[in-house]
């Protein structure tokens, strides 16, 4: 079983969700249900398994159900049908005190509009979660200082949110979410309000932190480039339904339908595709057959954009090695061109 299990969630908004639920179960889609009943389908039979330590990205167009999905993970809303569990524990069965403890101790949240407390300085914002957990001032300020430094804001402890740029405010938001050492970070469009360069910095920062912390991160975005950069896996929602879940390369190489295809059309393939999905795979046994000591050699996780420059520079067939230094594939110029242009 995976760490977070979302099973057959339906969420219907409106006064009589049960009637609409029956229609949804019988196969009616969001438009049909809205026309017939005036009810809005937020999620339609969504099941997902999220592994501990992975960065799981949820994407889709506006109104596809992304925020509705993440709100089921902190139980800001309850499903019309279905179940949600964390580490085998059914969060829908929790009473209010248990739910409050769950949110406080196990979840960290980062919001698009930063959600900082305007009358508290950086230190007190970052220490806030620990304060409501009852941690004494000295310990919580020590922990907060560590995170403030970690996100690059040392020296700004006494500043107030309105004295900081958007990027800096979101760093505070991230430090605050991490200060309680949560198991799971929920991030809903956390970087979407930032300028492109700052946004890219924050993505890098998050990836750096994640490489050390291995939190379970559920990250929502409507931006495919952001999804491909951050996500170990990506789920794509459309009209409340899950249309595809997969690794970035799977999404690019095998889009499930036209909706996903439309998302992937403008993607920079050079940055997403890796040697292992571009190469011509060698069958076991043939590894040593054509040893050419001058041939360029790369790892199987080398990005296509780097392969392009090696291929152009050397003009030779490139050998691809796996982590254990076995030659697993070959890439020649034709493969590079077809991977870029498909
Ligand atoms: N509280 C609510 N009451 C009624 N309908 C709702 C409510 N919350 C969400 N919806 C509807 O559920 C659907 C999914 O909304 P949701 O906010 O999850 O979309 P989203 O993918 O997060 O969109 P965005 O990218 O614009 O944030 C939409 O059709 C929306 O109108
Ligand atoms: Mg949303």
Image: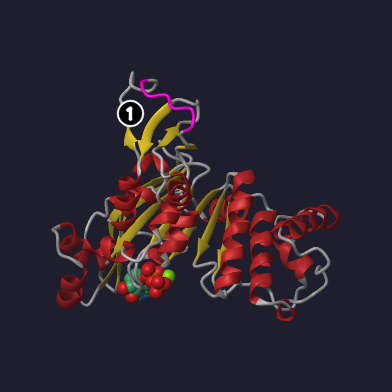
Say which residue appears at 13% left-offset and 58% top-offset: 26
x%, y% of residue 71?
A: 45, 62
Q: Quadrant of ligand 1?
A: bottom left
Q: Secondary structure at mark 1?
A: loop
- The quarter of the image holding the N terminus is top left
**Near-viewer residue (17 or 327):** 327
**Near-viewer residue (195 or 102):** 195
Q: Is residue 59 visible?
A: yes
Residue 331 appears left or right of 258: right
| In magenta stretch: residue 290 | yes
Give the extent of the magenta segment.
289-294
- Residue farthest along the top direction in this orientation: 285
x%, y% of residue 91?
A: 46, 49
- The quarter of the image holding the C terminus is bottom left
| In magenta stretch: residue 224 | no
Secondary structure of the magenta portion, mostly?
loop
Say which residue appears at 42% left-offset and 34% top-offset: 319
Q: Which residue is mark 1?
A: 282
């Amino acid at each position: 079983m995976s760490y977070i299990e979302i099973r057959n969630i339906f969420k219907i908004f409106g006064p009589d969700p049960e009637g609409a639920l029956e229609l949804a179960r019988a196969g009616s889609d969001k438009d049909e249900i809205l026309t017939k009943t005036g009810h809005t389908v937020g999620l339609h039979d969504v099941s997902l398994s999220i592994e501990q330590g992975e960065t799981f990205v949820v994407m889709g167009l506006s109104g596809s159900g992304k925020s509705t999905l993440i709100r089921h993970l902190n139980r800001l809303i309850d499903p019309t049908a279905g179940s949600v569990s964390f580490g085998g524990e059914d969060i829908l069965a929790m009473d209010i005190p248990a739910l409050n403890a769950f949110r406080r101790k196990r979840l960290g949240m980062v919001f698009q509009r930063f959600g900082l407390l305007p009358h508290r300085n950086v230190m007190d914002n970052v220490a806030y979660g620990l304060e409501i957990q009852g941690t004494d001032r000295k310990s919580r300020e020590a922990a907060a200082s560590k995170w403030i430094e970690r996100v690059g804001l040392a020296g700004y402890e006494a500043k107030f949110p309105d004295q900081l740029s958007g990027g800096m405010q979101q760093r505070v938001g991230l430090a605050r979410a991490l200060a309680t050492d949560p198991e799971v970070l929920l991030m809903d469009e956390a970087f979407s309000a930032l300028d492109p360069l700052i946004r890219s910095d924050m993505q890098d920062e998050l990836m750096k932190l994640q490489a050390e912390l291995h939190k379970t991160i559920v990250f929502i975005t409507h931006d495919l480039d952001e999804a491909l950069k951050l996500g170990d896996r990506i789920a794509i929602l459309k009209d409340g339904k899950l249309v595809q879940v997969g690794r970035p390369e799977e999404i690019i190489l095998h889009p499930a339908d036209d909706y996903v295809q439309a998302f992937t059309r403008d993607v920079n393939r050079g940055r997403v595709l890796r040697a292992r999905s571009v190469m011509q795979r060698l069958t076991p046994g043939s590894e040593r057959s054509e040893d050419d000591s001058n041939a360029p050699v790369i790892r199987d996780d080398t990005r296509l954009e780097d392969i392009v420059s090696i291929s152009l520079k050397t003009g030779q067939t490139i050998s691809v090695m796996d982590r254990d230094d076995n030659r697993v594939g070959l890439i020649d110029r034709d493969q590079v061109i077809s991977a870029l242009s498909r």
